[in-house]
């Protein structure tokens, strides 16, 4: 069972300019009794998310809509447990899996096979678990003998197929995505699509940020519209998409 | 409040310990990545280090007029250990900054990144330590069973380096130029600690300052002395053990207090 409960969660980013980050400046500020700090202090705080309150339960397929800079990525990071809210609470129970950057951790100098382990372990799988799924992953990626070649020799398509094949073997309870993953040529796309559908079906809660109306209408049963870090609308897909995209 | 702070830190550290296979793999990957496509890999470090030990050994052996049989093994362990200590601390400073990509994407316990740096340096130390038996062989100095005492010594040294790295990695994520300060401090410590010079050369009075009050001396001593068939003074054990306990207590409170802010600083 997975469960997410946000209560007035805010995210404030402190922006340290070059001087704010320097210990020297800090010491001088202290030494000069803060006078120098008065016009220098101006620590800028960017409020990325403001007073978010919502609850997600099993079966929720949530689409996040919003313009660039509305706070979608920040919210995804909050949901995946990377950030802790700077005020308010964000209770997340259940294993989260993030498919935001599926190439993260891939070492171009290592072989495809080694990278399957690297990527798998990063995503929280056990070595034995990966070993048992190794053949399936290799087959799915269609890399054939290239699997024992360094990844730097791969074409970008092969690279993505490998990353996709490993990343989609995990079955997290809460799945977090930034746009739908789609990789490869026509043939592979179908396979990938089927895999994604299966993955989404297996997960308890899905949160996906998107700019696509079709995607949201197809996969989601609830849509949250973020604007300037606040929830503008939180309702069923039809209502929100027609308000967001017009008609 | 205090209670939950400690909890935050302990939960993260325990979770990191559970992900030992991740730590092990990332550490290995770092070492391999540095030396991929080079035929002898990390042993390049060992080679350049042995050249340095040989050169310093000859020059300073002459200057200090120390017998080579005593000086060279002392210098070899000293330099090998010091390079382990100083790289662990300087790389410890940047361990969180360097892992920014992972930290901002995946909810992996942050202490994993500190352990990764530590493990990477232990692996490199494992390569460098092969110089030592070669030096012993060259100067025909025997090694006794008491050398095994350096194992608990090494564990204690590592425990100390772990809390230092943890605190520094958090501080350096916030104040970026601290890394440079730490590097200079370590440089000074290198000269103040008996690594290139034998402690017996010190006049009686200054030895109490440069040795007894120098934490690096005690940390070196608990690993180095048994390898050179010398006794470890009780003081070195007490100081190292005390630092580990105090340091870890401080590190846990400090880490628990700032852990949730770290991702924002990167």
Image (tube, helix red, strand yellow):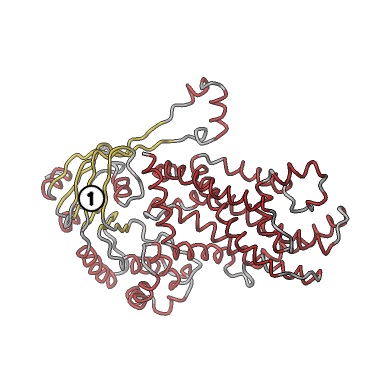
Q: Position of residue B37 (x, y in %)?
A: 59, 70
Q: Position of residue A132 (x, y in %)?
A: 35, 76
Q: Is residue A189 left or right of residue B135?
A: left
Q: Is residue A176 above or below residue A74?
A: below
User: The disc numbered 1 marks a residue on which chain?
Assistant: A
Residue pictured at 50% horizontal, 43% vertical: B250
Residue pictured at 47% horizontal, 55% vertical: B113
Q: Is residue A242 above or below residue A94?
A: above
Classify the position of the C terminus of chain A by image quarter: top left
Q: Position of residue B255 (x, y in %)?
A: 45, 45
Q: Position of residue A83 (x, y in %)?
A: 35, 46
Residue toward you, B39 or B174:
B174
Residue toward you, B194 or B188:
B194
Extreme residue in the front direction: B234
Q: Is residue B213 left or right of residue B101?
A: right
Residue B129 placement: quadrant: bottom right
Q: Is residue B184 above or below residue B47?
A: above
Residue at which label 1 appears: A4
Residue pictured at 48% horizontal, 65% vertical: B25
Q: Is residue A42 left or right of residue A100?
A: right
Q: Is residue A143 left or right of residue A232?
A: right
Q: Is residue B251 above or below residue B19?
A: above
Residue toward you, A143 or A137:
A137
Residue pictured at 62% horizontal, 63% vertical: B125
Local secondary structure at mark 1: strand
Q: Report the number of discs.
A: 1
Classify the position of the N terminus of chain A by image quarter: bottom left
Characterize the local packing of mark 1: few (<14), some (14-19) or many (20 or more) Cα atoms within 10 angstroms: some
């Amino acid at each position: 069972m997975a469960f997410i409960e946000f209560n007035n969660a805010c995210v404030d980013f402190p922006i340290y300019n070059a001087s704010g980050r320097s210990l020297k400046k800090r010491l001088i500020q202290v030494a000069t009794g803060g006078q120098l700090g008065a016009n220098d202090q101006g620590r800028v705080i960017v409020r990325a998310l403001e007073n978010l309150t919502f609850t997600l339960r099993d079966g929720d397929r949530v689409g996040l809509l919003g313009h660039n800079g509305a706070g979608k990525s920040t919210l995804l990071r909050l949901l995946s447990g990377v950030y802790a809210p700077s005020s308010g609470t964000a209770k997340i129970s259940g294993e989260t899996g993030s498919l935001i950057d599926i190439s993260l951790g891939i070492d171009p100098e290592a072989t495809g096979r080694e990278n399957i382990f690297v990527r798998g372990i990063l995503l929280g799988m056990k070595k034995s678990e990966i070993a048992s799924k190794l053949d399936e992953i290799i087959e799915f990626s269609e890399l054939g003998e290239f699997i024992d070649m360094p990844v730097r020799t791969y074409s970008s398509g092969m690279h993505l197929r490998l990353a996709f094949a490993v990343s989609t073997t995990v079955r997290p309870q809460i799945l977090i995505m930034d746009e739908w993953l789609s990789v490869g040529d026509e043939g592979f796309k179908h396979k990938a699509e089927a895999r994604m559908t299966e993955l989404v079906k297996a997960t308890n809660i899905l949160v996906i940020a998107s700019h696509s109306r079709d995607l949201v209408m197809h996969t989601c049963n609830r849509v949250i519209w973020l604007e300037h870090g606040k929830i503008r609308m939180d309702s069923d897909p039809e209502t929100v998409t027609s308000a967001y995209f017009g008609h | 409040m205090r209670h939950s702070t400690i909890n935050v830190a302990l939960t993260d550290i325990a979770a990191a310990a559970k992900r030992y296979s991740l730590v092990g793999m990332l550490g290995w990957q770092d070492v391999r990545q540095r030396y991929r496509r080079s035929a002898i890999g990390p042993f390049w470090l060992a080679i350049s280090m042995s050249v340095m030990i040989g050169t310093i050994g000859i020059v300073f052996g002459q200057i200090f007029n120390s017998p080579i049989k005593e000086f060279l093994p002392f210098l070899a362990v000293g330099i090998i250990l010091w390079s382990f200590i100083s790289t662990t601390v300087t790389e410890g400073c940047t361990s969180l900054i360097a892992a920014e990509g992972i930290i901002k994407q995946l909810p992996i316990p942050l202490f994993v990144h500190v352990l990764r740096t530590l493990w990477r340096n232990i692996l490199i130390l494992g390569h460098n330590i092969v110089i030592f038996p070669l030096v012993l062989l060259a100067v025909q100095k025997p090694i006794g069973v008491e050398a095994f005492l350096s194992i608990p010594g090494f564990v204690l040294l590592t425990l100390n380096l772990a809390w230092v790295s943890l605190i520094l990695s958090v501080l350096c994520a916030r104040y970026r130029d601290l890394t440079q300060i730490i590097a200079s401090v370590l440089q000074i410590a290198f000269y103040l600690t008996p690594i290139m010079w034998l402690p017996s050369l010190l006049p009686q009075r200054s030895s109490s300052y440069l040795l007894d009050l120098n934490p690096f001396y005690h940390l070196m001593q608990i690993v180095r002395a048994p390898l050179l068939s010398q006794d470890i003074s009780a003081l070195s054990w007490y100081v190292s053990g005390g630092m580990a306990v105090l340091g870890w207590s401080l590190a846990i409170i400090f880490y628990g207090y700032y852990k949730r802010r770290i991702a924002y600083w990167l």
